[in-house]
Amino acid sequence: MEDKKLLKEQPLAPGIKPGKEPGLLHPLDNIEDVEDFYAAINREHLQKALSAERPYTYWTIELYDKKNGIRGGGGLGVLAADTRRVAEQMNVPLTLITPFYPSEQHQRCTIDNTNGFFFQNSTESIPVDYKDYGFTFLDTVNIKAGSGLVKLDVIEKVLGSTRLLCITEPGFGELYSGDSGGDHRLYQEVALGFGGYQALKLAGLKPAIMQLNEVATFFAALARLDELASNGMDFYEAVVYTRKHTLYTNHTLVQAAEATFNYAQFERFVFPNLKSSAVKKWLSDKFDNGYIKLSTVTIEIAELRSGVSKLHARVANYREISGKKVKFKAVTNGIDIPTWTSKEAVDYLKAEGILDKFFLPTADYEAKLENISAEDIREIKLAGRRELNSVLEHRVDQYGNHIHIDEDGLLFEFKRRFVDYKRPWLPFSDPVRLKNILEKYNAHYILSGRVHEGDVTMTGRLTEVLKTIDSDPVLKARVHYLPDYDEELGRALSVGSNISINTPIVGLEACGTSWMKDIVNFGILISTHDGGVADCPASAYLNIAGESELEEIENLYTRMEEAAAAWGNDFDLELILKTELINFLPVISGSRMLKDYLDYLFPERA
Ligand SMILES: *Cc1c(COP(=O)(O)O)cnc(C)c1O
C-alpha cells in the first residue's frame, strides 16, 4: 500500500464550472442548455458546427440499448448506446444509424449432476418487433444484394436532441450471425451503409461528421463518396471531402486477425450499389490478390482515426496500403454515468460537488473527494445491494435457482463476455485459496458472462469452472454463475458488489467499460494494467502485476484479501476509493469522452 498516493491529474479543460444545481439527476430539459454545455466547456463554435438538420452521425453495426429494443453483444454496442445517451443529456444533435435486428439471442444453461457432471450451454432466439419500442416507420429504401433488390424499412425514434435511425427487414438476421467473412455478414454491412445513407436523406439530414464505430460501417462512408462523385464533384475532391469528414474508431488491436472478403462477393453485394465508375475503380484497386480487408479501405476513406484508450491508440498495429503505420488519436471510452450508477451514488457525487450537472468532474473534485466518508459509502452500497437483490429475484443461477446476497455480506464479482483473453477462470485457478478467502470474509462471488455460440474452448472453460463449483459444498454455497449476462445484470452487479475483478491478458483489452461502472459505484477494482485502466498509473487501483500467469494468480489472491480486509477498515476503504475516483473519474465520465470527440472533430479555427 505504500506506493498508493493521491495522484494528481489535470485533465479538465479550463472554464468548466461546478454544477449550479447539485442533486438533480436530469437537469437538462430545455434547449437553452445547448449553449450552456458548449459554454461550460468553452466551445461556443459548436453551435455552428452542429444543428438538428446537420447532426453528428454515429454508425454502428451493434447497439446495446434494450430499452429501445436493441440488444447488443458487448462493449462495442454499450459504447454506442452510451455515446447517444450522453449526447442527449448534453443536448448535442446526434443521429445514430444501426440495424434493428428482428431477433435476438439469449443464453440458456442446464446442469444435470445426477450421474456425473453434465453442463449444457445453449442459445434461444427470440423475435423482436420494433413497433413495441416506439419507433415510427418512415418509408422503405432499396439496396442491391445478390440476385436482386432488397427492400429495407427505415424506422426512427427521436430522443431529445438525438435520434435512432434504423434499417430492418424480416430476413435481416441476428447480430453477428454467420461467418465474419461470409455473404450474410457482408449483406448486413452493405445494408447498413447504403441503406442507412439513404435513410439519412429520407429523414432530411446531412451529416456534419460520420463516425464509423469499427470497420463494419465502412459502406456508409463509401455511399457518401459515391454520392458526391456521381453528383458531379471531381473524384479526387470527393475523396478529400469524404476523408475530412469521416472518423474511423478502431477497437481492435491487430489488423492481421481481421476477416477478408473476396472480389466475387463484392461483385454481388457492393459494386451493384455504386453509381460512380471512378469509385468502383478506386475500390477495385484496393484488392490484394482478390481479397480485401475493410480496415484497409476504412483507413483510406477516413482521415480522422481514433483508438479507445491511451494504451490501445499507441499499440494498435495498422498500416495504410502504402505501408505507413496508422496513427490513432486516443479518445478513451467513457460511460453514461446515470445509466450505470445507483441513484444514491449519483445524488451523492453531485451533492458533494464532485460531479457537475453535465456529469463532468468539477474543478475542485479532488479536494471534494477528500471529504467522502466510509459511512456514506456503506450507505450507498446498501442501497445498491438492495437494487441487486431486486434484480436477482427474477434472474437465476446455473442451477435455475433464485439467489439472494445478504445485505451486509461482502460480494466479489466478475462480469463480462466469456472470452479467452479476459480470463474469467483465473480466480478459479486455486479453488482452495478462493474458498478460504470467501469463508474468511463471509463473502460471495458472482460470475456472469455469455459464451459466444459455437466457442468450443470457452464452453469448455465455463464447464470446468462450473464443475469446480459443483464439486465443493463451500464454493457451491458462495459462488454463483448468472447466465444471459445483459445490461440489467451489468448495472445491478456494479451497484451491488463490493469488489470487482478484471483480468485481461495485458495488451489485449482495447478499453473495457465494465470496470468504470464499478469504480463510479464505490467498488474496489482489482485489475491487470490494460485497456482504459492503464490510462492511469497502476497505483490508482489494486493492480495485479506479474511476469507470468502464475505470478498474476498469486497476486490476484493477495489483492482479493487486501480488498476484502479494506471493507472492514474505514481508513483503508476511504483511501482506496478516493484514490480510484481521483484518478479515474475524469476518464469514466462519458461527457468527457464526448467533449474529447467534439474537440478532435471540430477544432476551433483561429
Ligand atoms: C458494460 C457492459 C459491457 C462492457 O463490456 P467490456 O468488456 O467491459 O467492454 C458489455 N456488456 C454489458 C451487458 C455491459 O453492461
Image: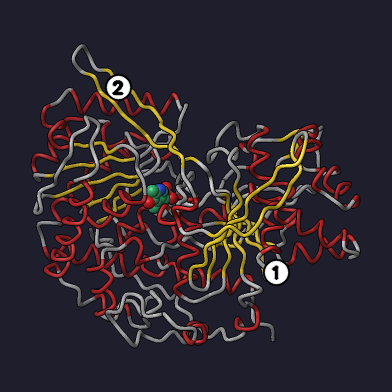
Q: Residue furthest top?
A: 115
**Above or below for 282 versus 174:** below
- Indicate the position of residue 340 as horizontal and vertical percent values: 34, 60
What colour scheme was applied to this rendering of the protein?
secondary structure
Closer-to-camera residue (543/89): 89
Crowding at label 1, few (<14), some or many (≥20) Cα neighbours within 10 Å? some
User: Does the rendering let one see residue 480?
Assistant: yes
Q: Is residue 97 above or below residue 354?
A: above
Q: Position of residue 62 (x, y in %)?
A: 53, 49
Instruction: Tell me the quadrant of the picture where the C terminus can be found.
Output: bottom right
Q: From the viewer's perspective, is the residue at label 2 or at label 1 nearer? A: 1
* Amino acid, disc 2: Phe
Would you identify the image quadrant in which residue 425 lies?
top left
Residue 530 can be seen in this image: no
Which of marks 1 and 2 precedes in the sequence?
2
Q: Residue at x 65, y 61 (%)?
A: 247
Res. 261 image quadrant: top right
Q: Which residue is rendered at x = 57% and y = 55% of the image?
A: 314
| Residue that mark 1 sits on | 206
Residue 391 position within the rendered picture, expressed as x and y whole percent measured from the top left: 23, 50
Please state, as top left, top right, bottom left or bottom right, where the N terminus lies in the image: bottom left
What whole-number distance in Å separates the C-alpha atoms at marks 2 and 1? Answer: 52 Å
Q: Secondary structure at mark 1?
A: loop
Residue type, mark 1 in image: Lys
Percent x, y for residue 417?
40, 41
Q: Secondary structure at mark 2?
A: strand
In the rendered image, which residue does mark 2 sit on?
A: 119
Q: Left or right: where does residue 159 sit relative to residue 442? A: right
